């Protein structure tokens, strides 16, 4: 199986994808700066995958006791740092090196991007430049990029196909569109590049074990973790951004997909890239079904036997009324489609939040500020 580098692999989507890849037999190297991720998430991923316990063997590594070799290695590092990237690639150079990269590292909050555009351009775009440079130094030309439906902006075509115009309406979307353009240019500049641009819609939910889930640092920027924190008593009430959108009930409509469906989609994309000739593969990952904010709230309440207070506030800058995927191309090209329902999303998301009312805090494996770590498994 392939050695895979996950940038941002200790975050929400990265940790669930890490588990899916380990269960498929891959060897995984994770690099994360823990700005919105958790070492504890990777410790739990290791346990769910049946790997061994963590232990620190030096100031620069975490490893396990198994002699068979590393299955999961964790590095603390910034994707904008050539030194950190070389350290992560270099750890796997023995025995074949990194065969593919799944690039999750980046900032992702629409509202925050409106207030801090330069930070978003620096992390999302400059970080990808540095990653591509490192891939060149280490002879790796296979990349799965974590893109977003946000780059479609406001479109009259619903559901949205991959051929829809790219017309982002916020800095976050602009950075995703810029990185896609850069990756396409890179693929055209030299033979051998295998690149998947995965435009996903609204990833939510959690692993059904309740052991790993979404744990944003600070005030959540997205609806579902905010909803879960209200249900768990961490927030007083849910704020619904806009009740006057041109939709059935006046609230925004989104295509929600279970994070495990999304994780499996990354694995399928990687399989296609490795099996087929070099190409740039652009795919939507979504359910193809739209649900309003109030429909999501009502499903969450009905599934979990709860009542949640909410209030409707002004629209949030950078948002759009409706965003629903046309996922047909993903099914045709890689046999992928969502298998889990909105009720599954709500059940698994609440199982995570109720079992971990403070997220990973309190049980968190805390790396030292200088720590670069490794996790071994059988």
Image (cartoon, rainbow, N blue to C red):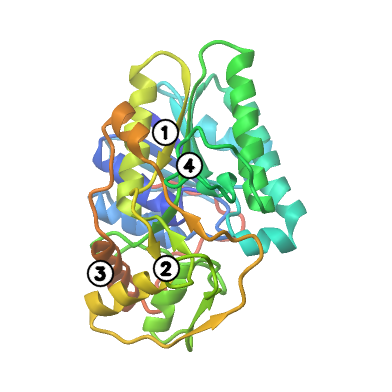
x and y percentages locating residue 295 in the rendered image: 35, 71
x and y percentages locating residue 9 in the rendered image: 46, 48
Nearer-N-terminus badge (4/3):
4
Where residue 285 is drawn, which disc sits there? Answer: none
The residue under the point 42% across, 43% down is 73
Where residue 199 is drawn, which disc sits there? Answer: 4
The answer to whether residue 203 is above or below residue 78 is below
Q: Nearer the viewer, residue 260 or 341?
A: 341
Q: How many angstroms separate mark 2 from mark 3 (CA)? A: 25 Å
Name the image quarter holding residue 301. bottom left
Nearer-N-terminus badge (1/2):
1
Q: Which residue is mark 2?
A: 248
Q: Which residue is mark 1?
A: 4
The residue under the point 25% across, 42% down is 23
Q: How many angstroms separate mark 1 from mark 2 (CA)? A: 44 Å
Q: How many angstroms separate mark 4 from mark 2 (CA)? A: 26 Å
Q: Dot 1 surroundings within 10 Å: few (below 14), some, or many (20 or more)?
A: many
Q: Nearer the viewer, mark 1 or mark 2?
A: 2
Q: Secondary structure at mark 1?
A: strand
x and y percentages locating residue 334 in the rendered image: 30, 29
Residues tagged 4 and 3 counted as in contact (Cβ below 8 A): no
Q: Which residue is mark 3?
A: 347
Residues tagged 1 and 4 counted as in contact (Cβ below 8 A): no
Q: How many angstroms separate mark 1 from mark 4 (CA)? A: 20 Å
* Quadrant (top left/top right/bottom left/bottom right) for the C terminus: top left
The residue under the point 55% across, 58% down is 34
The answer to whether residue 223 is above or below residue 62 is below
Q: Nearer the viewer, mark 1 or mark 3?
A: 3
């Amino acid at each position: 199986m392939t050695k895979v580098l996950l940038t941002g692999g200790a975050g929400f989507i990265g940790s669930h994808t890490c588990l899916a890849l380990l269960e498929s037999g891959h060897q995984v190297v994770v690099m994360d700066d823990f700005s919105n991720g958790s070492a504890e998430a990777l410790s739990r991923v290791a346990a769910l995958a049946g790997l061994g316990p963590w232990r620190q063997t030096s100031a620069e590594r975490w490893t396990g006791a198994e002699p068979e070799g590393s299955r999961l290695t964790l590095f603390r590092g910034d994707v904008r740092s050539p030194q950190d990237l070389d350290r992560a690639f270099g750890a796997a150079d023995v025995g074949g090196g990194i065969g593919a990269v799944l690039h999750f590292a980046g900032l992702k909050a629409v509202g925050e991007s409106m207030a801090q555009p330069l930070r978003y351009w620096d992390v999302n775009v400059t970080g990808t430049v540095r990653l591509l440079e490192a891939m060149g130094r280490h002879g790796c030309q296979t990349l799965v990029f974590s893109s977003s439906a946000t780059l479609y902006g406001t479109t009259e075509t619903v559901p949205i196909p991959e051929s829809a115009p790219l017309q982002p309406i916020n800095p976050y979307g602009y950075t995703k569109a810029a990185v896609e353009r850069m990756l396409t240019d890179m693929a055209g500049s030299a033979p051998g590049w295998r690149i998947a641009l995965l435009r996903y819609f609204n990833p939510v939910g959690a692993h059904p074990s309740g052991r790993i889930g979404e744990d944003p640092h600070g005030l959540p920027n997205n609806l579902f973790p905010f909803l879960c924190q209200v249900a768990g008593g961490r927030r007083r009430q849910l704020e619904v951004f806009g009740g006057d959108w041109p939709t059935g009930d006046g609230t925004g409509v989104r295509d929600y997909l279970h994070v495990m469906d999304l994780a499996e989609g990354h694995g399928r994309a990687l399989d296609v890239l490795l099996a087929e000739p070099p190409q740039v593969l652009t795919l939507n990952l979504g359910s193809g079904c739209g649900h309003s904010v109030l429909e999501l709230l009502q499903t969450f309440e009905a599934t979990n036997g709860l009542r949640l207070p909410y209030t409707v506030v002004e629209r949030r800058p950078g948002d759009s009324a409706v965003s629903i995927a046309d996922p047909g191309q993903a099914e045709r090209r890689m046999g992928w489609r969502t298998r889990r329902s909105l009720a599954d999303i709500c059940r698994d998301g609440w199982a995570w939040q109720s079992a971990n009312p403070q997220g990973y805090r309190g049980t968190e494996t805390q790396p030292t500020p200088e720590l670069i770590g490794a996790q071994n498994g059988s």
